[in-house]
Image: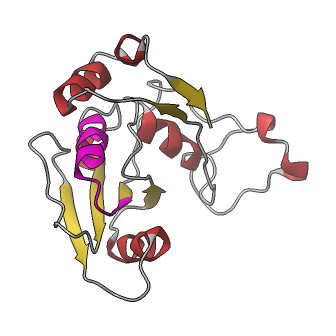
Amino acid sequence: MSRSVGGPMPVPRQEWPLVSPPALGAWSPQQTVSVILPARDCQSELDLTLAGLSEQTYPGELYDVVVVDDASAMELRLPEVHPPHCRILRLESAQEHGSGRARHAGALVADGEIVLFLDADIVPTRTHIEAHARWHAVLSDAVVLGRKLFVDFAGVTAADVRNATRDDAFESLLAGRNHKRH
């Protein structure tokens, strides 16, 4: 079951194996993607996340990143290593704060045809955006979920992440580090 972007496509009986998204690296993405990162008081984690997002297989001109600073005590900043189309939206103090408010604020300013929510402490592999967006090439109304590992990144720098992402060498970067599945 494969077709181009259009209206909603039914997936009878939730039989997702019948849906065939394009293979990673074997298609020509056309849709724009806005990656929304809700963040609060997490500059060091954000630096690693943005380093991973700076080396994606998805075409750089087709994605942007909106970091939503949810009233951090010290305003978050864009580090040296970040995607070319990246900005910070600062939310000031409010009684109600949290990732839900930040996601909503980010979605309101998103320009992409696809909105991808990613936590600011998730370090993405180089195909992360492409792996999500390819489902929208066949299902315009897909809600795409991914898998993650909890990994000890102590001592890892943004440059380490950028290089491992660019060189598709995450296995080497994570070798010997404590990790567990979600």
Q: Could you tell whether 11 is left or right of 114 in the image? A: right
Q: Position of residue 48 (x, y in %)?
A: 27, 38
Residue 36 lies, with reference to residue 23, above or below; the image says below
Q: Nearer the viewer, residue 134 or 41?
A: 41
Task: Name the magenta segment's main secondary structure.
Answer: helix
Q: Residue furthest right?
A: 13
Q: Nearer the viewer, residue 114 or 104?
A: 104
- What segment is highlighted magenta in the picture? 37-53
Toward which corner of the image does residue 36 lie, by quadrant?
A: bottom left
Q: Nearer the viewer, residue 131 or 104?
A: 104
Residue 169 lies, with reference to residue 108, above or below; the image says above
- Give the residue displayed 29% in from the left and 54% down from the top: 42
Verify whether residue 169 appears in magenta: no
- Tell me, yes or no, if residue 23 can be seen here: no
Residue 80 lies, with reference to residue 11, above or below; the image says above
Give the quarter of the figure containing the N terminus: top right
Q: Position of residue 18 (x, y in %)?
A: 80, 36
Q: Nearer the viewer, residue 153 or 5?
A: 153
